[in-house]
Amino acid sequence: MIQIEQLSKTYQTKHGTVTGVDDVSLEVKTGEIFGIVGYSGAGKSSLIRCINLLERPTAGTVSVGGQDLTKLRGEGLRKARLKIGMIFQHFYLISQKTVAENIAFALRAAGTPSKKIGPRVDELLDMVGLTDKRGVYPAQLSGGQKQRVGIARALANEPAVLLCDEATSALDPNTTLSILRLLKDINRKLNITIVLITHEMNVVKEICDRMAVMQGGRVIEEGNVYDIFADPKTALTKEFISSVVSFNVPEETLKKCDGTIIKVLFKGAVAGEGIISDMLQTYPVKGNFLHGAIEYIQERPLGIFVMELKGGQAEVQQAIVYLEQREAIVEVMDHGN
Amino acid sequence: MGIEWERIIDLWPEIQVAFYQTLVMIGISLGVALVVGLPLGILLFITDRGLFLENRSVNSVIGFVVNIVRSIPFIILLVALIPLTQAITGTTIGPVAASVSLSVAAIPFFARIVETALRDIDKGVIEAAVAVGATPWMIIKDVLLPEAKASLIQGITLTVISLIAYSAMAGVVGGGGIGDLAIRFGYYRYDNTIMIVTVVILIVLVQLIQQAGDFTAKKLDKR
């Protein structure tokens, strides 16, 4: 649905040229939710704003639905934008217009006949659960409600793509969750492709199918969200993951352990605890759980356990090999004494 | 010193005429400022860097012309525009004639006020409208003007009050008006009564306009 090819964006400032996006190529498939994570300044905001050409790329191309947007200007670009919805961290509603008028604004941009605007506004308000706020001004709404209006406005012209620019970053955790559920729901019902940027890894964990990690304007890691959570390659990705799935065992506890410390990871439907107990029965080693949890990512379980194995070196080694044979990913964190 | 009430009664018809002349001058020049200055101010804003109709040359030319007119002291503008006034109104005396110079001064003044008011709008709101696929005209009509409504009304108030001050100078070219009355009787003839009466009228007028402006701005703002 979206092809980004060798896209770069640089800015001219008083202090010289600043690179926002540096040679990024990405493909977002139809109907998927694609998350781009990175700290502020990583270039993710520039990148998403290049997708609908709010910022014109310095180099490279962006195609949405097979159409190269970088070739368009003026009226052609405006028409293309009707089919690319966008929501923002600070909502950006017209403060002097009611909820219904804000949504109608988008419909009028597409030249919707006035007779059809009313019913369509009602339909959209129903979709985002704000039927009772029709005639209210944005100032009287909560953050979550404002974002729902933003979503209704973005979806007004039945776009193929929805861009979310830090859409939940100004919201509290509960509201964030409800907005994410709404996005997921919309994604499923309308088969709309969603690209979102965020610095919150839980957003990605909650709703994304695939993800990319950005740093210094570049994409440093990209792939299926589940796979990346199971096996992050870069230090930055690990850092992001540890913000939602943390398996840090306190130093004090580790000092007291004299066995081998291992981190065991079970993907998918494998019953992790069962395998560990099998191992403990098969090999003459003792095991202590230091940490453990089963996370559900894209509704698939991901089991991660940190444990101390005590026993003869050879036995511990055999036990680890056994776990690996049973499809666990084992990482030895400390070889013990 | 002291107010002679009989003087006021004597000159009351003249005060009324002067008041009417002031209203004519302000009405005409404000009308022209709105009709010409508003689009000019919008143009100044939307052709600026990073906005949806960015056009550096249009922006610089308008900005330059606006600055030139605004640099000229009004009294000089008043005299310099006598030929233009003659050409447009067929005369150089009276409130309608004075309105030509007042309008010329008011246009760039109001244009800058409009530009400043628009600059205060959150850029994100404009960007969201661009992202939605709105036409430039829709953005002006449904985003810029409504969002700047309150500050535009404050700007109109400011313009009217400045025009009242300027219109006092219109007496120089025989424009008439309250200010002219104050200068002719009060200043040149040391007629304190007329001076005080006219000044009081001006004070009341300015207060009323300011209050009406503040009230309307507040009433219309939905934030």
Image (tube, coloured by chain):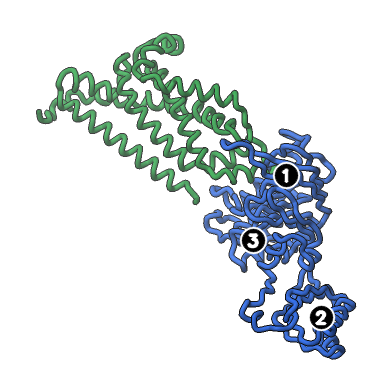
Chain colours: A blue, B green
Q: Residue at x 88, y 81 (%)?
A: A322
The chain to which mark 2 is attached is A
Disc 2 element = helix
Q: Residue furthest left?
A: B1
Mark 2, other Cα within 10 Å: few <14 / some 14–19 / many ≥20: many
Q: Is residue A109 above or below residue A297?
A: above
Disc 3 element = helix
Q: Earlier in the sequence, mark 1 or mark 3?
A: 1
Q: Which residue is mark 3?
A: A131
Q: Which residue is mark 2?
A: A272
Q: Position of residue A231 (x, y in %)?
A: 79, 66
Q: Quadrant of the N terminus of chain B?
A: top left
Please identify the quarter of the rendering in which residue B145 is found. top right
Camera-side residue of B37 and A311 = A311
Q: Is residue A148 above or below residue A317?
A: above
Give the CA separation, mark 3 to mark 2. Answer: 46 Å
Residue kind at label 3, given as amino acid type: Thr
Q: Do tags 3 and 2 sit on the same chain?
A: yes
Image side of residue B104 versus residue A249, left or right: left
The chain to which mark 1 is attached is A
Q: Which residue is mark 1?
A: A22
Q: Earlier in the sequence, mark 3 or mark 2?
A: 3
Disc 1 element = strand
Q: Residue at x 38, y 31 (%)?
A: B160
Q: Residue furthest right?
A: A325
Camera-side residue of A274 and B215 = A274
Q: Position of residue A234 (x, y in %)?
A: 74, 60
Mark 3, other Cα within 10 Å: few <14 / some 14–19 / many ≥20: some
Give the CA separation, mark 1 to mark 3. Answer: 43 Å
Give the CA separation, mark 1 to mark 2. Answer: 41 Å
Q: Is residue A271 visible?
A: no
